Image (cartoon, rainbow, N blue to C red):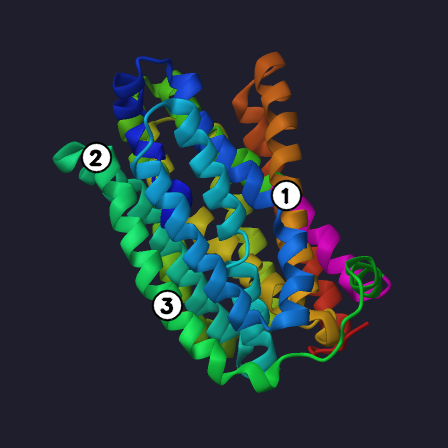
């Protein structure tokens, strides 16, 4: 996640380095994201066939190559290509880690462990956005990629060493990618989780994407200040991950899903109609908490959609989340251009409130049991 977000704050440095526009430099961000989304379905079946920890280890080592290539980029096209390669490699890390947790952790304890993973990804996202800019300012933007390459190299070596000890746990099933995907999609509950995840991604991320622009246009905040306010979204996610165990004991899966939808509904309607920018501070914090409360519950069910093809199932989960984000931002941009950003926030607030309630009801109908179908 740090690698995904590291270019966000270094765009001005890239513009100066390569004498280009911000839009052209931003290809280093969009190239990574596109490759990351497209390659999701490739890694799931690969992990099911060859062992999830082993594939994660090699994907991590491949990220080392991409980051070093980025650090040595002689021109912008080279940098974009390096970022695309890194995105292709990084796509195999988080979803297969979730699937690996699903293999080794009992369902009753799984949501708590996945919440710790979630906390790590949010922390990585925040570090990437903040440290990427800081390192670029202190030692140059190439240094940020060099630091990431070193981290990927060390952790990748450790993971591949660990994977050798887990080789005996490698699944024996060698079914085709299509067969594995169809196996997941043949299960009614899996289809339900995937549809809700897609809608969640569309509504939540489309709203978040336009908050900085809304604060800048409505309250004349500078973009760095507006971006700092939106960073509280990640802080809200860290708060959730820190207290996930207690929250799960108190509310259960159904309660967390409903609480997540309610928090996001309240947060986005506050942003839509706030009389001053100060209201956005608690709103972004609550939105982040709510998103991860709902999303962590969806993650847990995603790991149980098809235990025999868990890598494929979780990769499909990540793929539809990415698809939802992409479609949601496109639709939201159309609404912003023709109406207003407040309409996007209000629509997302209502949609997420209903979505959390519907998913809570459906989970309750299943009596909280980790059924596969």
Mark number, residue 157: 3
Mark number, residue 136: 2
Counting other residues with Cα less than 10 Å from the Cα at mark 3, is it few (<14), some (14-19), or many (20 or more)?
some
C-alpha separation, residue under disc 1 versus residue under disc 3 = 26 Å
C-alpha separation, residue under disc 2 versus residue under disc 1 = 29 Å
Say left or right for 165 vs 174. left
Residue at image location 59% in from the left, 86% down from the top? 168
Secondary structure mostly seen in magenta is: helix
Counting other residues with Cα less than 10 Å from the Cα at mark 1, is it few (<14), some (14-19), or many (20 or more)?
some
Query: In this picture, is 208 found above or below 108?
Result: above
- Between 240 and 106, the one nearer to me in the picture: 106
C-alpha separation, residue under disc 2 versus residue under disc 3 = 27 Å
Residue at image location 35% in from the left, 35% down from the top? 7
Residue with the mark numbered 1: 38
- Between 313 and 359, the one nearer to me in the picture: 313
**Where's the C terminus, which quadrant?**
bottom right
Q: Position of residue 255 (x, y in %)?
A: 58, 67
Say left or right for 253 vs 174. left
Q: Position of residue 327 (x, y in %)?
A: 66, 33
Q: Which range is magenta? A: 186-201
Counting other residues with Cα less than 10 Å from the Cα at mark 2, is it few (<14), some (14-19), or many (20 or more)?
many
Q: Position of residue 287 (x, y in %)?
A: 46, 47
Query: In this picture, is 84 found above or below 355?
Result: above
């Amino acid at each position: 996640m740090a690698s995904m977000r590291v270019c966000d704050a270094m765009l001005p440095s890239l513009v100066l380095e390569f004498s280009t526009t911000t839009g052209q430099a931003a290809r280093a961000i969009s190239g990574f994201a596109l490759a990351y989304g497209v390659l999701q379905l490739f890694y799931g079946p690969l992990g099911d066939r060859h062992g999830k920890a082993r594939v994660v280890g090699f994907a991590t080592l491949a990220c080392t190559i991409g980051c070093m290539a980025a650090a040595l980029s002689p021109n912008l096209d080279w940098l974009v290509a390096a970022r695309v390669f890194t995105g292709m490699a990084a796509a195999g890390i988080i979803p297969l880690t979730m699937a690996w947790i699903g293999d080794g952790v009992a369902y009753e304890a799984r949501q708590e462990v996945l919440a710790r993973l979630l906390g790590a990804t949010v922390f990585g996202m925040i570090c990437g956005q903040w440290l990427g800019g800081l390192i670029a300012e202190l030692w140059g933007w190439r240094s940020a990629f060099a630091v990431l390459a070193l981290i990927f190299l060390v952790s990748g070596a450790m993971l591949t060493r660990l994977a050798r000890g887990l080789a005996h746990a490698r699944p024996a099933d060698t079914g085709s990618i299509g067969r594995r995907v169809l196996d997941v999609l043949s299960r009614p509950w899996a289809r339900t989780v995937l549809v809700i995840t897609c809608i969640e991604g569309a509504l939540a991320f489309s709203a978040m994407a336009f908050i900085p622009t809304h604060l800048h246009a409505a309250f004349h905040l500078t973009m760095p200040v507006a971006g700092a306010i939106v960073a509280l979204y990640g802080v809200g996610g860290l708060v959730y991950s820190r207290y996930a165990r207690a929250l799960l004991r108190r509310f259960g899966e159904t309660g967390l899903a409903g609480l997540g939808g309610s928090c996001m509904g309240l947060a986005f309607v506050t942003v839509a109609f706030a009389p001053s920018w100060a209201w956005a501070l608690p709103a972004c914090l609550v939105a982040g908490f709510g998103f991860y409360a709902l999303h962590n519950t969806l993650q847990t069910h995603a790991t149980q959609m098809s235990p025999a093809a868990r890598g494929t199932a979780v990769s499909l989960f990540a793929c539809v989340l990415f698809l939802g984000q992409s479609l949601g931002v496109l639709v939201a941009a159309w609404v912003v251009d023709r109406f207003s950003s407040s309409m996007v926030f209000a629509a997302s607030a209502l949609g997420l409130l209903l979505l959390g309630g519907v998913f809570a009801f459906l989970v309750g109908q299943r009596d909280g049991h980790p059924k596969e179908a």
